[in-house]
Amino acid sequence: DTAVSQTPKYLVTQMGNDKSIKCEQNLGHDTMYWYKQDSKKFLKIMFSYNNKELIINETVPNRFSPKSPDKAHLNLHINSLELGDSAVYFCASSQDTGRDGYTFGSGTRLTVV
Amino acid sequence: QQQVKQSPQSLIVQKGGISIINCAYENTAFDYFPWYQQFPGKGPALLIAIRPDVSEKKEGRFTISFNKSAKQFSLHIMDSQPGDSATYFCAASITNAGKSTFGDGTTLTVKP
């Protein structure tokens, strides 16, 4: 059983399109995150949700909108995709905002052409 | 302002050698310091972590050394193996703040 699963694994799309990435965790964790990893492998937090409530919203363009329908799911919708959005997006989860570390998904490689 | 500085950017070690990766932080409110290991095409995986009330933690071949006064911590991999070749990230977090700040990563290559 995959603990944190993301779909799709790969996403190739044209500039200007709208796309979504889905994330689900079966660990019973109460906090979920989206991280972006660029081509240099730098990991930057985008959003954090605790019990479905947004607690961290870093300086991310408002074209990115997270949605957490319940504690086990955190989706990421991206409007009007730009070339610079190309990256690997990781979903992660933790218990109690990370007191014992995070469990990451395997990532979604987004390529905007 | 980069809150967690990691070095070196890349590291090549012979099989059986010791790999050492260093991190320095600025925010004294950080209270949890994990290390993650990432293989190509995979997400980072929690390897080992330490809290500032101890100076060292060991799990198998992996040891974290923590120096609170210097605001530095390091990962030591003893008897490094080719299977340890991966990217390693240090991180620091304030556990009730809901985010971890990651270092820039170190690509470790262990030569047979």
Image (cartoon, coloured by chain):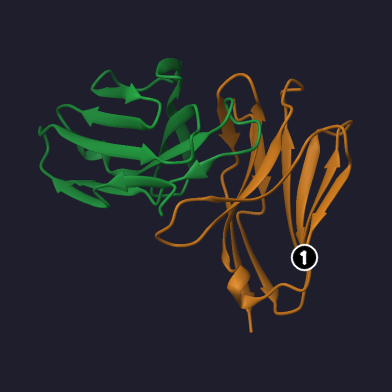
What residue is rendered at 77% in x and 22% in y?
A: B28
Where residue A84 sits: x, y (%)?
A: 27, 37
Q: Is residue A1 visible?
A: yes
Q: Determine whether the residue tagged by mark 1 lies in a helix, strand or loop.
A: loop
For this view, does A24 lie left or right of residue B82?
A: left
Vertical comparison of A91 with B21: above or below: above
Q: Chain of mark 1?
A: B
Q: Which residue is mark 1?
A: B61
Q: Is residue A113 visible?
A: no
Where residue A81 sits: x, y (%)?
A: 17, 33
Label 1 neighbourhood size at 10 Å, few (<14), some (14-19), many (20+)?
few
Please name the color used to draw chain A. Answer: green
For this view, does A9 lie left or right of residue A79?
A: right
Please name the color used to draw chain B. Answer: orange
Where residue B105 sits: x, y (%)?
A: 57, 49
Where residue A101 sits: x, y (%)?
A: 61, 38
